[in-house]
Structures are given as structure tokens and as C-alpha cells.
């Protein structure tokens, strides 16, 4: 075999992109970017709402200090009904000492 079949193959011609194709590609890329930015913004602004509710915190401690381990533990256990180990980990990760 001398590779005669390789010489006989025809390479597919690559068609240049049309203006319409480039426009669609730019639109899809921009849309994905905007959706990612909106998703990140929603996650950023709702991060504080993931913890115990403000009303519950205020009912327990009017000047609530999330850096105070004792206050953080009480608020976590009462407002979110978590177990002690889970609240301890959560408070430590948020910087309570």
C-alpha cells in the first residue's frame, strides 16, 4: 500500500461566515454574558437573605452582632431550627468568635 487513497481524497472547502452568521454569534455571546451577569447580581444581592430573618434577629437581639459567637449561635438555633453543630460551623465560617 502506497497510500494512493490519501492522494485521492478531496478536502472539504471551508465556507466563509456570512454577516448574518457573525451577527447571530455576537448576539448569542452577548446574551450569555448578560444572563451570567444578571445571575451573579441576583446571587450577590440575595446572599444576606439566606441567613436568619431580620425580624427574628431583631426580636432576640436589638443590636445583633453576627461576630459575637454567643449571639450568632442563639439566633441560628432559634431562627433557623438548626442543630448546634451546624450553627457552630455556620457562625465560625461567618467570622464569629
Image: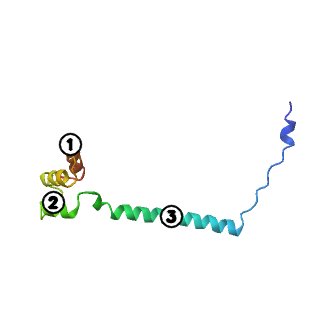
Q: Residue at x 28, y 61 (%)?
A: 49
Question: Looking at the figure, which quarter contains the N terminus?
Answer: top right
77 in relation to 22, above or below: above
The crowding category of the residue bearing disc 2, from other C-alpha atoms within 10 Å (few below 14, some 14 to 19, many at least 20), is few
Q: Residue at x 74, y 62 (%)?
A: 16
Give the residue number, with chain letter if any, for mark 3: 33
Q: Do callouts 1 and 2 mark residues in contact (Cβ within 8 Å)?
A: no
- Quarter holding residue 40: bottom left
Q: Earlier in the sequence, mark 3 or mark 2?
A: 3
Q: Earlier in the sequence, mark 1 or mark 3?
A: 3
16 in relation to 86, above or below: below
Q: Residue at x 18, y 61 (%)?
A: 56
97 left or right, relative to 36: left
Tell me how far mark 3 sits from mark 2, CA to CA.
Answer: 37 Å
Element assignment for label 1? helix
In the rendering, at what x and y percent does residue 51 appear? 26, 57
Element assignment for label 2? loop
Q: Earlier in the sequence, mark 1 or mark 2?
A: 2
Q: Which mark is residue 85?
A: 1
In the rendering, at what x and y percent does residue 21 appear? 68, 65
Amino acid at each position: 500500500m502506497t497510500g494512493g487513497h490519501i492522494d485521492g481524497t478531496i478536502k472539504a472547502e471551508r465556507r466563509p461566515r456570512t454577516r448574518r452568521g457573525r451577527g447571530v454569534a455576537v448576539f448569542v455571546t452577548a446574551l450569555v454574558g448578560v444572563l451570567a451577569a444578571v445571575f451573579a447580581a441576583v446571587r450577590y444581592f440575595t446572599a444576606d437573605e439566606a441567613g436568619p430573618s431580620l425580624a427574628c434577629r431583631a426580636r432576640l437581639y436589638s443590636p445583633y452582632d453576627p461576630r459575637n459567637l454567643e449571639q450568632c449561635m442563639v439566633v441560628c438555633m432559634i431562627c433557623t431550627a438548626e442543630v448546634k453543630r451546624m450553627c457552630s460551623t455556620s457562625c465560625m465560617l461567618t467570622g464569629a468568635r
